[in-house]
């Protein structure tokens, strides 16, 4: 596959009239609808686009699940108190915040009936919580089953609402949700990426082990293929570059000093375990020349990229690229701000066994931005951009591909009808404008 598909600038696109362009997009969309009719039954008809749109809510809680026994799992929850509203409308006349968590546990999102649900309300005294408010609560979850947990968090002082989904797998006692990571100060770690030279401990309530097998994977994930390329996607390799055993107890401290994927397993006979990722000191942010330089690959040809690699400093290459695209410094700064904010949120939302911007969803999110509509099921997501009523839109379907490293890997169903839209998007960025479907 030649990467020129990412970056090829079709000069005649600039001479196509608006009417002709809309016609092309409408034809592509209709073809896409025909190809996606089989997907309609597999996603729940409820728009949940806010789950990947940070501007949709003022609160952005973090959640993970830890299995403590065969019948009970605990939901760990954290919210940044700077995002909460506070007032003195309470008996104590002190600054307090107040929010509500409503959860529903589904055996499948396609079934409107849920296995369990509850509502919890929390008061947050401002003087007691400087930074984060953390809590956890138990949920009955039978063994050997898979669930989807839907959480709706509402700030009860301004009624800003956040919806999130957590895939829960309790089929084995050795998968990642059977491990709890804590920092050296005793607080739970909410992300699966660990900063270099930061120490942590590992707990596992459902296993008795005195050692852990650590497998390390050094390989870099290649750039995903364009959405219209029909070549077969190469699966991830599960052959470690190196491995070793470490003594284990709940007090042992670990650190990940080198970049890569680390896989902690109970022993060599297991195929699942605890994956942890070390993607650099600032991840998911793009604060290094390397993290700024990589995402440019979506917008330039192989030849252009090789020329940029010849710059003495990657930062100069990045500046040169965006200045050439925009024509002036101020416009460059605006393009950089928006483009790399998309890369950042792609890393936040779509990280799995790779940096989020290198995933299929990360690719679409970076170039197209947050979708207007998302329909979600347990193992699929349908993203719709634009106005579906007048057919000026794009429709992308992603299917979950579980692997030992992650349950957050969704693969795009690639279609040739995306070609004109992709070229238009790349050309728009290359001409100094932020792309949206309605451009």
Image: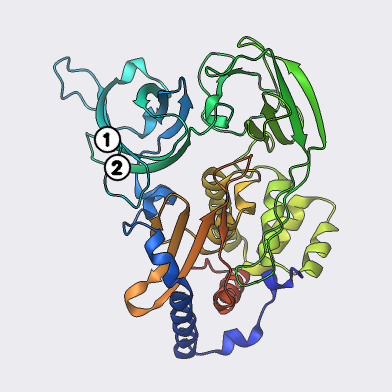
Considering only vertical position in the picture, is 111 above or below 264? Answer: below
The residue shown at (67%, 59%) is: 224
Say whether marks 2 and 1 touch (CB < 8 Å). Answer: yes
Instruction: Residue 75 in the image: state x and y as whole percent.
Output: 40, 27
Instruction: Residue 210 in the image: state x and y as whole percent.
Output: 68, 12
In the displayed structure image, the side of residue 269 where residue 374 appears, left or right: left
In which image quadrant can residue 325 be found?
bottom right
- C-alpha span from label 2 to label 1: 7 Å
> Which residue is tagged 2?
161
Q: Nearer the viewer, residue 411 or 60?
A: 411
Figure coloring: rainbow
Residue 337 visible in the current orientation = no
Graded by Cα atoms within 10 Å as few (under 14), some (14 to 19) or many (20 or more), the crowding at tag 2 reads some
In the displayed structure image, the side of residue 50 where residue 249 appears, left or right: right
Considering only vertical position in the picture, is 209 above or below 58? Answer: above
Q: Nearer the viewer, residue 329 or 240?
A: 240
Instruction: Residue 377 in the image: state x and y as whole percent.
Output: 41, 53
N-terminal of the two: label 2 or label 1?
A: 1
> Which residue is tagged 1?
155
């Amino acid at each position: 596959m030649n990467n020129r598909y990412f970056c090829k600038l079709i000069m005649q696109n600039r001479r196509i009239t608006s009417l002709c362009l809309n016609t092309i997009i409408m034809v592509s969309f209709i073809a896409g609808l025909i190809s996606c009719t089989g997907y309609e039954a597999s996603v729940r008809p409820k728009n949940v686009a806010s789950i990947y749109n940070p501007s949709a809510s003022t609160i952005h809680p973090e959640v993970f699940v830890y299995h403590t026994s065969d019948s009970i799992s605990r939901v760990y929850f954290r919210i940044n108190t700077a995002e909460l509203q506070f007032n003195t409308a309470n008996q104590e006349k002190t600054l307090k915040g107040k929010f509500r968590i409503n959860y529903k546990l589904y055996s499948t999102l396609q079934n409107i009936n849920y296995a369990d649900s509850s509502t919890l309300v929390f008061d947050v005294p401002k003087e007691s919580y400087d930074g984060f408010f953390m809590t956890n609560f138990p949920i009955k979850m039978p063994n050997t089953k898979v669930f989807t947990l839907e959480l709706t968090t509402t700030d009860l002082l301004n009624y800003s609402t956040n919806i999130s989904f957590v895939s829960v797998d309790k089929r084995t006692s050795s998968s990642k949700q059977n491990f709890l990571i804590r920092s050296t100060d005793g607080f739970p770690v909410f992300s699966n990426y660990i900063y270099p030279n930061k120490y942590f401990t590992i707990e596992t309530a459902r296993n008795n082990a005195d050692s852990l097998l650590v497998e390390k994977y050094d390989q870099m994930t290649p750039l995903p293929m364009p959405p219209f390329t029909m070549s077969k996607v190469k699966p991830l390799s599960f052959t470690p570059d190196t491995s070793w055993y470490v003594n284990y107890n709940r007090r042992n401290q670990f650190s990940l000093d080198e970049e890569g994927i680390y896989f902690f397993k109970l022993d060599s006979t297991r195929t699942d375990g605890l994956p942890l990722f070390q993607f650099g000191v600032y991840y998911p942010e793009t604060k290094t020349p390397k993290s700024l330089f990589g995402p440019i690959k979506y917008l330039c040809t192989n030849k252009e990229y090789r020329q940029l690699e010849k710059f003495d400093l990657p930062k100069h290459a990045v500046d040169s690229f965006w200045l050439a695209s925009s024509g002036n410094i101020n416009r460059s700064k605006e393009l950089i701000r928006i483009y790399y904010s998309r890369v950042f949120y792609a890393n936040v939302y779509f990280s799995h066994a790779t940096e989020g911007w290198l995933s299929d969803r990360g690719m679409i999110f970076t170039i197209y931005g947050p979708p207007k509509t998302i329909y979600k099921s347990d193992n699929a997501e349908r993203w719709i951009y634009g106005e579906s009523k007048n057919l000026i839109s794009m429709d992308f379907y992603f299917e979950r591909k579980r692997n030992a490293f992650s349950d957050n890997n969704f693969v795009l169903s690639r279609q040739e009808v995306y070609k004109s839209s992709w070229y238009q998007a790349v050309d728009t960025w290359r001409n100094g404008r932020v792309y949206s479907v309605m451009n």
